[in-house]
């Protein structure tokens, strides 16, 4: 909005009226001229969002502008919870990576709050012990770590991250799907204890 007298774009709003189209009275900061403008304020629309957290999912409605363009990977705040978009389903039933809200049927997202859940598999020469742990999202696992979990002490041999399987290096819990280990040597000292982090047993 430019001042019709001096073309300045710097102004203050003196008065507004109307709900969806607002008539505003502006005062130019440069020359002091007052002028009226009409602004269209887009109405918020409701869109269905399905937020998954571990194995559960929750259906909610999110209030959002219809012309806003959403993209997979983007982070939204829904009821004060940060969620990341994993998929967008449009009104024709297709899955797209980017779309304006007005064309969307459902937003699929995953919660970014709370701990990360990581699977642990320890190989006792063919017999596999599997557990799941919940741990701080930024906790760092490194191949070679000696870890205590319940009565077991194991050494991390490899890890499956969201993007690949790694046999060396580190990954934060948030990026780690599963940690693979082998029983540690008798005289290995464990560096950390995951016993209190175990959430469920797997078969
Ligand atoms: Zn002016």
Image (cartoon, grey):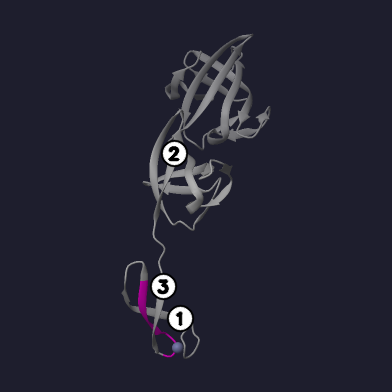
In three-dimensional space, the C-alpha distance between marks 2 and 3, rounded to whole angstroms, equals 33 Å
Pointer 1 residue Cβ closer than 8 Å to ligand 1: no
Which of the two discs, 2 and 1, labels the residue nearer the N terminus?
1
Nearer the observer: mark 3 or 1; the answer is 3
Residue 91, percent from left and from top: 50, 45
Which residue appears at 48% of the width and 82% of the height? 2
The answer to whether 138 is drawn above or below residue 165 in the figure is below
Element at badge 3?
Answer: strand
Q: Answer whether residue 13 is visible to the viewer in this image.
A: yes
Element at badge 1?
Answer: loop
Which of the two discs, 2 and 3, labels the residue nearer the N terminus?
3
The quarter holding residue 172 reads top right
Residue range corresponding to the magenta coloring: 22-31
Q: Main secondary structure of the magenta part?
A: strand
User: Pointer 1: residues within 10 angstroms few (<14), some, or many (20+)?
Assistant: some
Residue picked out by circle 2 = 50
Nearer-the-camera pick, 56 or 100: 100
Looking at the image, do the residues carrying marks 2 and 1 touch, with CB atoms under 8 Å apart? Answer: no
Is residue 25 within the magenta segment? yes
Which quarter of the rendered image does ligand 1 occupy?
A: bottom left
Residue picked out by circle 1 = 10
Residue 96, percent from left and from top: 58, 45
């Amino acid at each position: 909005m430019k001042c019709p007298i001096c073309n300045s774009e710097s102004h203050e709003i003196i008065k507004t009226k109307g709900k969806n189209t607002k008539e505003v009275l502006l005062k130019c900061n440069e020359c002091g001229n007052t002028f009226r403008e009409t602004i269209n304020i887009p109405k918020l629309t409701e869109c269905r969002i399905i937020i998954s957290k571990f194995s559960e999912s929750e259906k909610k409605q999110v209030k959002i502008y219809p012309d806003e363009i959403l993209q997979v990977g983007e982070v939204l705040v829904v009821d004060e919870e940060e969620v990341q978009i994993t998929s967008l389903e449009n009104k024709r039933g297709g899955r797209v990576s980017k779309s304006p809200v007005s064309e969307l049927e459902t937003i699929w997202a995953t919660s970014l709050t709370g701990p990360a859940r990581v699977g642990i598999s320890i190989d006792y020469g063919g017999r596999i012990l599997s557990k799941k742990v919940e741990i701080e999202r930024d906790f760092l696992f490194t191949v070679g770590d000696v870890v205590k979990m319940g009565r077991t002490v194991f050494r991390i041999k490899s890890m499956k991250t969201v993007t690949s399987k790694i046999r060396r290096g580190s990954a934060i819990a948030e990026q780690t799907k599963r940690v693979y280990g082998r029983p540690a040597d008798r005289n290995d000292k464990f560096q950390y204890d995951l016993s209190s982090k175990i959430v469920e047993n797997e078969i």
